[in-house]
Amino acid sequence: MSSEPTPPQDAADEPIDAAEHARGLSLERSRRLGQLDAMRSAGTNPYPYRFDRTHTLADIRKEFGALEAATETEVHVEVAGRMLLKRDQGKLIFASLRDRDGDIQLFVSKAIVGDELFDAINALDLGDWVGVSGLVMTTRKGELSIKVNKLVLLAKAVRPLPDKWHGLTDPDTRYRQRYADLISNDEARRAFAIRHAIIASFRKTLSAKSFIEVETPVLHAEAGGAHARPFNTHHNALDMPLFLRIALELHLKRLIVGGMERVYEIGRVFRNEGISTRHNPEFTMMELYQAFGDYSDVMAITEELFVAAALDAIGTTIVDINGTATDLAEPFRRVRMIDLVAEKTGVAVHPSMEREELRALADKHNVHVQPQWGTGKIIEEMFEALAEHELMAPTFVTGHPVEISPLARVDRNDPFLTERFELFVGGRELANGYSELNDPIEQRLRFEDEQKAKEAGNAEAGTVDEDYLRALEFGMPPTGGLGIGMDRLTMLIAGVPTIRDIILFPTLRPEVFE
RNA sequence: GCGCCUCUAGCUCAAUGGCAGAGCAACGGACUCUUAAUCCGCAGGUUCUGGGUUCGAAUCCCAGGGGGCGCACCA
């Protein structure tokens, strides 16, 4: 409002020195900042506090999308959005306005708004936020429009938008200036809408199954629940080292001990490892635990979650995997890890075999075996080297050796294997689950093996978590557990090739501002 | 960490050893049904940074920085 105090503004405040003043961007910013000063001098706040709209742009399109061409209505609406395009016709201006989920054309006639407002609208820059009131209409060509009566600037854009047709293409700029990417690239907006829909779908599905959503600590005294290098941090008041969590698992299972029966968490985990098209140092996991079930129950839940998420996010269960249309609604293939290795090597393998025999087989297939690896680890390495990357259609790989699965329960039919699965799609691991080990005596032995591996120099190995063992000693019912990589699932459903396209602000080196 | 590629106007891109250019955006002008509006005019440059070769470097070489891809790491 005009009575609001306007802080003193001076163009000389701008940190643009005289030598730079003639340069393109500086010149453009100066011009727009000059508009701000002029508005303030005239008693108008270029950044007003609020605007009440009657409709979103999608509302208008839904309600009036069927209007015939050249229709004038008496329906008065108030809308708000960012002005992205402007087509000046002399005494008529067409502009494109966009809000969160729609767009619409503004029809501005000099005869209706008068000379002063017409000139003000003409002086707006692409990128400015505006609030508009007017009547719903269609043009002679049939374009749904708002015949503008009044228009107010809601926020001035001082920087110019990216190219109106090509948007932003430079990956560096797209990730660093995600705001500009979202303004100018439809594909970016689409990917993050899909991400939201998937997470919302998970919550809906799990709530319907009586799962409770919980939040467990991100700061851990011990980084357990997976094999990965953690980020280290420090608590000042307690003067103690802490780790950012690498998994959600051990706290959620404590809640199963506590009797919550069905819990899940969707949360960020942190792994201090390489960055690639499939890895970001912080990423989002969904883990759930269901009392009285085993790994077959959580495999079924995995399929159900995937199908519902795809339907909710993109309206179909058909997704593209490396150029092949694949229906997620079909039951996922199930195959044991040892059978995949046998298939690739032509030799039946099993963790009970002599280590030397497996090592020779691995050598033959150029899998380099490290001295501390046991038979189970050798089998897994052969699986990863020979079979994993070829698993395109969704495949549950099951029966991981005990050696590499310290938290999973031994297979009821084979003491060398666990009741575990990993889900692979497009050659990538998307999920991991098992019948949870709930015998505290056996869990202690498994932890002690981990501790030995860590002391032998394996930085990813775990340690003995005494509190977790104490929890198990109170008794954990039979439980099935599942973890799903939400980022990779989103990549699959959105059909994007890199994890940076579905993480709003991926990890980058810090930008240097001069 | 290693290898390959890449970095030019606000944005999208040309120029491959010989005068740094175009489109969009901006600026000035024309236009009352356009929609990537159109048309006329004008302006905008530390070619990522530093060094070198050369009569001459955006271009070739060296070093550094950002980014991409691949490898390694990621049980």
Image (cartoon, coloured by chain):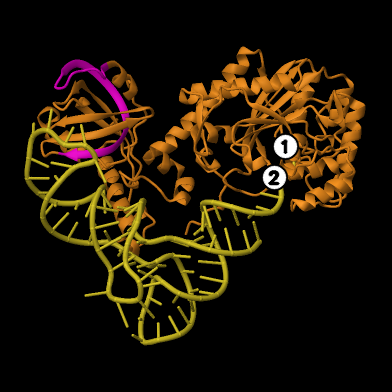
Residue hosting label 1: A340
Label 2: few (<14), some or many (≥20) within 10 Å? Answer: some
The stretch of residues the image draws in magenta is A64-88
Residues tagged 1 and 2 counted as in contact (Cβ below 8 A): yes
The answer to whether A327 appears left or right of A44 in the picture is right
Mark 1–mark 2 Cα distance, whole angstroms, equals 9 Å
Q: Chain B is drawn in which colour?
A: yellow
Question: Closer to the camera, A104 or A483?
Answer: A483
Question: Is residue A70 within the magenta segment?
Answer: yes
- Chain assignment, label 2: A
Q: Which amino acid does label 1 sit on?
A: Leu
Q: Is mark 2 on a helix, strand or loop?
A: helix
Which secondary structure dominates the residues rendered in magenta? Answer: strand
Q: What element carries label 1?
A: helix
* Count of picture labels: 2
Residue hosting label 2: A386
The answer to whether A324 appears left or right of A15 in the picture is right
